[in-house]
Amino acid sequence: MAMSIQIESFINTYGKEKRIEENNFELILDGYHLYPMDVPIYVKRRESDTPVGEGIIKSLLLSEGKTKIVYTLTALKSIN
């Protein structure tokens, strides 16, 4: 049985991120997504948007058709 997976080069939040504490956020997405770990990558609202900042993914969990990441926002370029 094949499993569909997307390889990501930046974080698309789609406005679904939840602040855990200070600059740490949790994001749960439908489907399976692989991200680079422990390196800064751009954070965007949507694929076509310009980056709003940079984040470092600290944890990645693939389970039951969903992806859960926890990332630290390390740079903020815009609040809108």
Image (cartoon, rainbow, N blue to C red):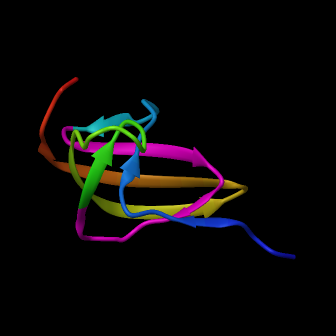
Closer to us: 74 or 2 = 2
Q: Residue at x 60, y 63 (%)?
A: 62
Q: Is residue 34 magenta?
A: yes
Above-or-below relation of 80 to 49: above
Q: Is residue 39 magenta?
A: yes
Closer to us: 43 or 64 = 43
Q: Residue at x 26, y 53 (%)?
A: 42
Rendered-image quadrant of the C terminus = top left
Rendered-image quadrant of the N terminus = bottom right
Q: Residue at x 75, y 70 (%)?
A: 3
Is 55 on the left-hand or right-hand side of 27?
A: left
In percent of width and height, residue 52 lies at: 22, 39
In percent of width and height, residue 8 lies at: 45, 63
In percent of width and height, residue 56 lies at: 25, 60
Magenta segment boundaries in residue numbering: 22-40
Q: Residue at x 52, y 53 (%)?
A: 68
In percent of width and height, residue 38 lies at: 27, 70
Is 63 on the left-hand or right-hand side of 6?
A: right
| Image quadrant assignment for residue 58 | bottom left
